[in-house]
Image (cartoon, grey):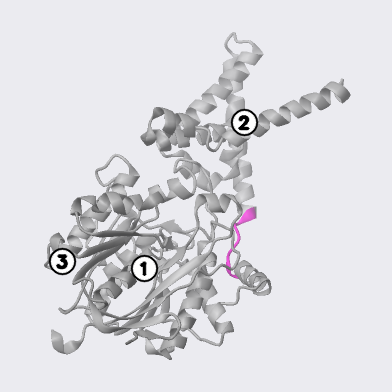
């Protein structure tokens, strides 16, 4: 049997899967950040015209997914599968955001790594011949996430320096065969890695070992190193999580230079926007990729990148019962569009 | 990734080195002055209410009611969390913090209905304080009964 597996965790797609379009819709705080000009839509109203934050999140999902399909010059009926997820219990943000699409749907949970999970599975579905077009995305909302995981918004507490700020928004891509766009060539699927971190206010530290583990596995499977990439971008480790990844890999004899960055670092201005460790949430990597990196790839300013959204796999119950916070990362190699096809 | 106990310990040390700590001295000073200011304000209220013909107990009650009302209103307008960010324990410890901890979940969970939402979740933060506050007052009462008289 022909195998597409290269190494223990990586697969190489038989034919590269094209990212036909990417769309990003963000909330007001993200619109004030350094990436504002790269986002498709910025919404001033945190409620997005709805009555609750959960409904607002679903509104982000619905609007942005429609936008992604529209940007790909396709119709919702053309989508063979929708793959998406969010942070809310039972993935309700995605379910209520996509229910009116009436397309085959897989709800995913990978915490903040969901965008990587959705793109990985979508690309595999297409390469396996099970779909022509897949709509993949992820969303989060600052207020709904705070409500579910932390404290009521009105509570007057202090955030520690290692706390991160959940990104409000939705990022979505249309994956397909053929056509013009950046291509997914390889997928490295992450393992659950738990280094015993229990501090829910230091998610970067909880996820960093999973990111380091994934980068190491990817290099091992493909025989490449940091020098083979224009950018290695993790999901939402933030400033301190990034430092930990660099340090962890240094110990393993693998050097990462300034080409390695994190979406949580890029999306906010740490000092001016008072976001402490940086951005987090499913939307952090999703909108940063769909907004910024997609355009960089299209303009061929980045030729090959390793995109690895990261997630902290915890629930409120597991945290209250004293469980540590396992992390995960899902890696994709994404290359700029082949020149001749334009 | 090596996830043995040994490397977990090493990693914990690494995290401690990389992660910045909360600025304890700054936080303490802010808490001291803001908490002190709230208490001074309460004392001012006490003096003011004392000019009316209230009994001493009633004056104390009025001071508490006024501080709670101000705190609830500031919470409703989203001002209290901004104060809390800077003042920390200064705005949490006085009675205003207690009011904030009841008002904020009440507002947050109103969307889930008056009974299962607001009613049930209102004491999400303050609940443990009430439970263990009552319990410890009973214990202190027992000790006082046998030893203190």
Q: For the residue carrying disc 1, how many other residues have a C-alpha within 10 Å: few (<14), some (14-19), or many (20+)?
A: many
Foreground pick, A51 / B75: A51
Quadrant showing the N terminus of chain A: bottom left
Q: Earlier in the sequence, mark 3 or mark 1?
A: 3
Asked if A170 appears above or below A148 in the picture, the reply is below
Q: Are marks 3 and 1 in contact (CB under 8 Å)?
A: no
Q: Which residue is mark 2?
A: B130
Residue A136 lies left or right of residue A262; in this view the side is left
**Callout 3: helix, strand or loop?**
helix
Asked whether residue B23 is drawn in magenta, I would say yes
Q: Foreground: A107 or A253? A: A107
At x 63% / y 48%, what residue is drawn?
B29
Of tags 3 and 1, the one toward the viewer is: 1
For marks 3 and 1, give the CA distance.
22 Å
Q: Position of residue A49 (x, y in %)?
A: 24, 43
Front: mark 2 or 1: 1
Residue A5 pos. (x, y %): 38, 84
Q: Which residue is mark 3?
A: A71
Q: Where the C terminus of chain A falls, by quadrant? A: bottom left
> Image point 65% across, 15% down: which residue?
B57
| Secondary structure type for disc 2 | helix
Point out the stretch of residues depicted in magenta: B18-24
On screen, A12 above or below A67? below
- Left or right: residue A213 versus residue B136 is left
Return the chain for callout 3. A
Indicate yes or no whether the magenta region holds residue A97: no
Front residue of A128/B45: it is A128
Residue linked to disc 1: A117
């Amino acid at each position: 049997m022909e195998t597409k597996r290269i190494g223990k965790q990586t697969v190489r797609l038989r034919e590269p899967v094209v990212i036909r379009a990417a769309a990003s819709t963000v909330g007001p705080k993200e619109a004030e950040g350094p990436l504002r000009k790269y986002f498709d839509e910025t919404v001033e109203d945190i409620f997005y015209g709805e009555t609750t934050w959960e409904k607002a999140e679903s509104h982000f999902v619905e609007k942005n997914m429609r936008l992604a399909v529209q940007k790909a010059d396709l119709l919702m009926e053309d989508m063979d599968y929708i793959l998406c997820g969010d942070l809310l219990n039972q993935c309700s943000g995605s379910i209520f955001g996509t229910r009116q699409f009436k397309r085959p749907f897989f709800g995913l949970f990978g915490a903040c790594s969901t965008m990587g999970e959705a793109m990985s599975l979508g690309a595999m579905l297409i390469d396996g011949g099970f779909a022509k077009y897949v709509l993949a995305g992820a969303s989060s909302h600052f207020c709904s996430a705070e409500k579910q995981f932390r404290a009521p918004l009105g509570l007057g507490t202090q955030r520690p320096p290692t706390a991160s700020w959940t990104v409000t928004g939705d990022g979505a891509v249309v994956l397909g065969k053929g056509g013009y766009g950046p291509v997914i060539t390889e997928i490295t699927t992450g393992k659950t890695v738990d280094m015993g971190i229990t501090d829910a206010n230091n998610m970067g530290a909880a996820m960093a070992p999973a990111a380091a583990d994934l980068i190491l596995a990817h290099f091992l499977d493909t025989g490449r190193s940091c020098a083979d990439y224009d950018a290695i971008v993790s999901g939402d480790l933030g400033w301190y999580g990034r430092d930990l990844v660099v340090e962890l890999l240094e110990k393993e004899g693998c050097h990462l230079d300034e080409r390695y960055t994190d979406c949580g670092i890029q999306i906010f201005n740490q000092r001016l926007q008072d976001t402490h460790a940086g951005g987090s949430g499913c939307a952090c990597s999703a909108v940063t990729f769909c907004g910024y990196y997609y355009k960089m790839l299209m303009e061929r300013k980045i030729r090959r990148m390793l995109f690895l959204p990261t997630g902290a796999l915890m629930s409120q119950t597991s945290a209250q019962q004293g469980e540590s916070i396992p992390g995960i990362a899902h890696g994709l190699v994404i290359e700029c569009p082949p020149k001749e096809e334009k | 990734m090596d996830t043995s106990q040994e490397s977990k310990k090493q990693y914990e040390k690494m995290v401690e080195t990389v992660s910045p700590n909360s600025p304890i001295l700054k936080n303490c000073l802010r808490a001291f002055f803001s908490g002190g200011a709230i208490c001074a304000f309460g004392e001012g209220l006490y003096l003011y209410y004392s000019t009316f013909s209230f009994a001493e107990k009633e004056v104390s009650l009025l001071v508490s009611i006024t501080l709670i009302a101000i705190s609830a209103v500031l919470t409703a307008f989203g001002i209290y969390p901004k104060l809390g960010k800077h003042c920390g324990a200064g705005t949490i410890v006085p009675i205003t913090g207690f009011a904030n901890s009841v008002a904020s979940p009440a507002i947050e969970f109103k969307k889930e209905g008056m009974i299962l939402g607001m009613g049930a979740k209102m004491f999400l933060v303050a609940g443990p304080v009430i439970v263990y506050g009552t319990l410890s007052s009973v214990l202190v009462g027992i000790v006082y009964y046998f030893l203190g008289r």
